[in-house]
Image (cartoon, grey):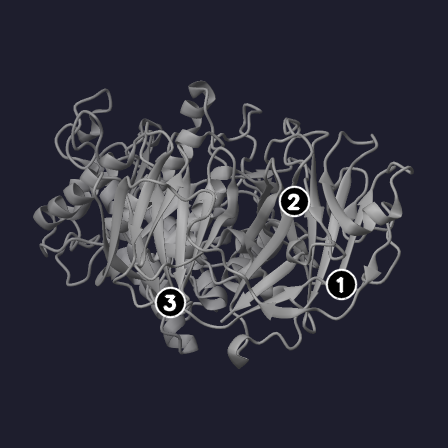
Amino acid sequence: MLGGIGFAAGFAAAPVRPAVAARAALVSGAEVVVRNDSVGRGMSLVGYNTGHYLPGSNTSAWVAYSRINAARFFASFTEWAPDEAFDDGSGIATVGDFDARRAELRTDPEGNAFIRWDLLEDLFEHHTYANTNHYRLNYQVGELRRLGVTPILEAAELAWNRPWSGLWLQWQKHYAFSYHLARHFDVERYNFVNEPDHPSAAGDLVDQAVYVRGLQIASDAIRSAIADVNDRYGKRLRATVQAPVITHASSSSGDDHMDADHDADHRDDTTGWGEVSLRNLRTDYHGEQVDQDLFDVFDTHQYNKQAPTYEYEIDMMRAKMAAYTPTGVALPIVYSEFNRRNTGAFETSGDDVETPAILTDLARIWAAGCAGGVEGMIAFKFQNTVRSNGIPYGTGFYYVADEGAYDIRGATKAAEVNRMFARGFAGDKELLTVTADDGRTVLAAHDPAGGRTYLWLPHPPGVPTAPVTLDLRDLPEARPGGEVLVEEVGPAYSGGVVERLGLPPSGRLTLRQPADSVWLVSLSAPGPRVSVFADVDASVRRDGDPAESEAELEAELGVCLVPDGTPGAQVSYLEFDLRGARPGGRTPRHALLELFGSTDDGRPLTFMAYALSDTSWSGEDLTWATAPHLDPVHCRPSDVGTAVFPAGQLTAPGTPGSVRLEVSDSLRYAVDGRLGFLLIRDRRRAEDVADDGRRAVLSGRRSADRTARPRLVLSD
């Protein structure tokens, strides 16, 4: 197929369908009412526990795609802080000896006789973590900071049941690790010991007294290190310690492990792990009362539960924090691990993170956390890395290759739910009052930076496709000319835009929401919108049918995946010239990719769009062998993270219709005013074969129907 250069990009007012669209309901059902009343802020930390993260991989591109603003990862001191890099504690027998050596070290953090910085710095820069998650420390933290993602370090070693000489060794490890990351990367957040309440920790944390003393010493080391970095380098970092990082704060049996739990693990028969941590909030390792909290955030995990458990648990934790802390103040709450099921449960449950019921459960859990005012929720885990038993983590949200640099191969439907939530509710959004008359879980938030209001609508469990009326008339954007976009993840869609509607004068509209679906509805105020038509397109096939006419190829684009080495695979390219596209005279902040087409078998087909910063291919005669940024053997994109960036998943309907995707994030990849897209159905994992041989057929830039031609709709 030839890749040609057409006429200059066309600019036109973007057509918006009225709210009597094909999916609009004919009768009224559930009603959701949004009021312009502020009831809080968005979730400060929306993130993942990361897995592999190596130089040369495409991981950073997918982290950026995910829209998260926080990431937690494990850093065992066995690897990152070996004993030989520190003073062994000889001569330390009492807490007084400990204090004297601590004071001496802090007089010269970088030139003392205790820490071998040469050994540590080499490890931090060059060592590859050998545990389940393979990463290089400096590289991963540097990339996260570059992307605006807050790192949360689960850095520890179970070596606390020791005399003061051994505790001095642990203090040095926490100090040196925290000092390095604060000095070079401004890292502030640390967990102390992952799940001390798990029976596997009992070999070292033989009782709660050992645990509390360890927390006191580690907290002091972290705070001392960050304070010393601030003093030496003029920074204003704030140490944030998260504890107790327990497996759960409640269960079907009661409020364990917040409170006592009379089970086979007798360490918490009298006092719960949450309670003992909170009661010692103002006690230091000397056993003295101090005026600073031992930790700053109440951290817990939760798996295998649905949203009502979180709703109960958040209120319970706040009440018990107020009762158990010496200050009577409830700390912020972070769930540093959560998922609908844990790894073991997914291996036997018969469902996974692609299952619609799991998606809607996750969406309701996100809503429960946000409505409950938690500071953060960190899903476990980013990639489906392979466990020691050879089985990939069923909790993984992104598919990852188990070879080479461990590249990401694609996103699950659950990942797209999390991505929608992050766009609408992460960070400094203003939460609004919203009610639903059927009791469903809903959220609404205004984004002052983006000029939009978002509505989070997980479909109620066990309810078939049904109408829902949205009453938006109290919102400032609800004026004639306002626009509503509906993005959907569910059985048929993976984050694409299923509706683009003009808001009726009444400020109300009724739509039919499919069963087991999650919607992110966005309302934007009236304003100029500009359509930029593709000025270049191309479609290439592997061993394409030579009988197909050139005229047909020029008028349409296609996407098809087939087994490696067999004919028929097809990908398509688009290029847009954005120079001069300034809606209202301003640089566009929002972009919607609009295509038109269908599948060849009458069933919806989902495929990926990748943004291309490199458009040097335009004007060339493209073949399968010369197609840019394409692995011709495996039919997947190459150069992801350097010239190719994931933009989202589109779904072609079974009958001719619009194919839309919100691609505002992709605008940052335009170079010299030009932005390209690669449309491809790439194989995310070996088992991903259900769509082999199926094809999406899309109108090209030379389509006789001008309204069906590929376009970007831009707005401020």
Question: Which residue position is annotated with label 2?
Answer: 597
- N-terminal of the pair, mark 2 or mark 1, is 2
Mark 1: few, some, or many residues within 10 Å (few <14, many ≥20)?
Answer: many
Q: Which residue is at 36% across, 41% downward? A: 26
Q: Which residue is at 66% across, 27% downward? A: 689
Which secondary structure lies at badge 2?
A: strand
Question: Which residue position is annotated with label 3?
Answer: 480
Q: CA distance from mark 2 to mark 1?
A: 24 Å
Please identify, in this view, whether the residue under mark 1 or under mark 3 is nearer the observer.
Answer: 3
Please identify, in this view, whether the residue under mark 2 or under mark 1 is nearer the observer.
Answer: 2
- Front-most of residues 231 and 92: 231
Residue 207: percent from left, percent from top: 23, 33
| Residue 275: quadrant of the picture | top left
Which secondary structure lies at badge 1?
A: loop
Q: Report the side of 535 relative to 468 (left or right).
A: right
Residue 90 in view of the camera: no
Q: Report the side of 676 relative to 593 (left or right).
A: right
Residue 590: percent from left, percent from top: 51, 65
**Which disc number belongs to residue 52?**
none
Disc 3 marks a residue whose amino acid type is: Pro
Question: Which residue position is annotated with label 1?
Answer: 615
- Front-most of residues 610 and 7: 7
Disc 1 marks a residue whose amino acid type is: Thr
- N-terminal of the pair, mark 1 or mark 3, is 3
Which secondary structure lies at badge 3?
A: loop
* Residue situated furthest bottom in the rendering: 585
Disc 2 marks a residue whose amino acid type is: Gly
Q: CA distance from mark 2 to mark 3?
A: 30 Å
Q: CA distance from mark 1 to mark 3?
A: 38 Å
Mark 3: few, some, or many residues within 10 Å (few <14, many ≥20)?
Answer: some
Residue 486 in view of the camera: yes
CB atoms of marks 1 and 3 within 8 Å: no
